[in-house]
């Protein structure tokens, strides 16, 4: 139940992020979630979109360096301790969270988090064993 994520490497300068979003807008690609991490010289923009193929092609055609990676989307109880329950199960299994970010969901009593793990398949197995809902890509891209 992996989800495809697009990582875009961009220079850390004014207007570069707008070039990415403009490229995606022109291609008719809708952003579903994003995370931006930066250093002095460059940034990594991580995206969940509604059409990965279109996004990847448009961004590459515009000269951006793009990589597809796999992440896991997880429903988290929207209550105190909801995220802790999941992280504790992963910790006990010796699985490291490399990074995570929130996915905007319009309604419901669950939050959705996107995770990148050092042991992707093992993490999915631990989550499912812990009765945590792992969301597949086809559902996530349309949320």
Image (tube, grey):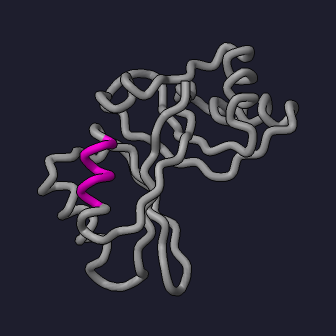
Query: Is residue 36 positioned above or below 29 on the image?
Result: below
Q: Nearer the viewer, residue 35 or 120?
A: 120
* Quarter in which the N terminus is drawn: top right
Residue visible at 37% across and 22% down?
139
The question of residue 105 being in magenta is answered with: no
Q: Is residue 55 left or right of residue 33?
A: left
Q: What stretch of residues is rendered in magenta?
A: 52-59
The question of residue 58 being in magenta is answered with: yes
Q: Is residue 74 left or right of residue 117?
A: left
Residue visible at 85% across and 31% down?
93
* Quarter in which the C terminus is drawn: top left
Query: Is residue 131 positioned above or below 3 on the image?
Result: above
Q: Nearer the viewer, residue 66 or 31?
A: 66
Query: Is residue 118 positioned above or below 89 on the image?
Result: below
Q: Nearer the viewer, residue 122 or 39?
A: 122
| Count of residue discs | 0
Residue visible at 86% across and 38% down?
94
**Does the magenta stretch mainly form a helix, a strand or a loop?**
helix
**Image x and y of residue 142, in percent:** 29, 28
**Image x and y of residue 109, in percent:** 45, 22
Q: Is residue 138 left or right of residue 7?
A: left
**Residue 86 location, quadrant:** top right
Q: Is residue 75 left or right of residue 95?
A: left
């Amino acid at each position: 139940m992996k989800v495809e994520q697009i990582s875009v490497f961009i220079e850390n300068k004014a207007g570069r992020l707008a070039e990415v979003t403009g490229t995606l807008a022109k291609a008719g690609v809708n952003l579903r979630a994003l995370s931006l991490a930066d250093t002095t010289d460059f940034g990594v923009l991580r995206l969940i979109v509604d059409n990965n193929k279109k996004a990847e092609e448009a961004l590459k055609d515009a000269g951006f360096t793009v990589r597809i990676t796999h992440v896991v989307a997880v429903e988290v109880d929207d209550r105190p301790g909801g995220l802790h329950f999941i992280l504790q199960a992963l910790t006990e299994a010796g699985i490291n969270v490399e990074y995570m970010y929130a996915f905007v969901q319009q309604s419901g009593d669950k939050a959705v988090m996107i995770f990148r793990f050092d042991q992707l398949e093992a993490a999915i197995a631990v989550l499912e064993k812990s009765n945590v809902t792992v969301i597949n890509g086809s559902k996530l891209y349309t949320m």
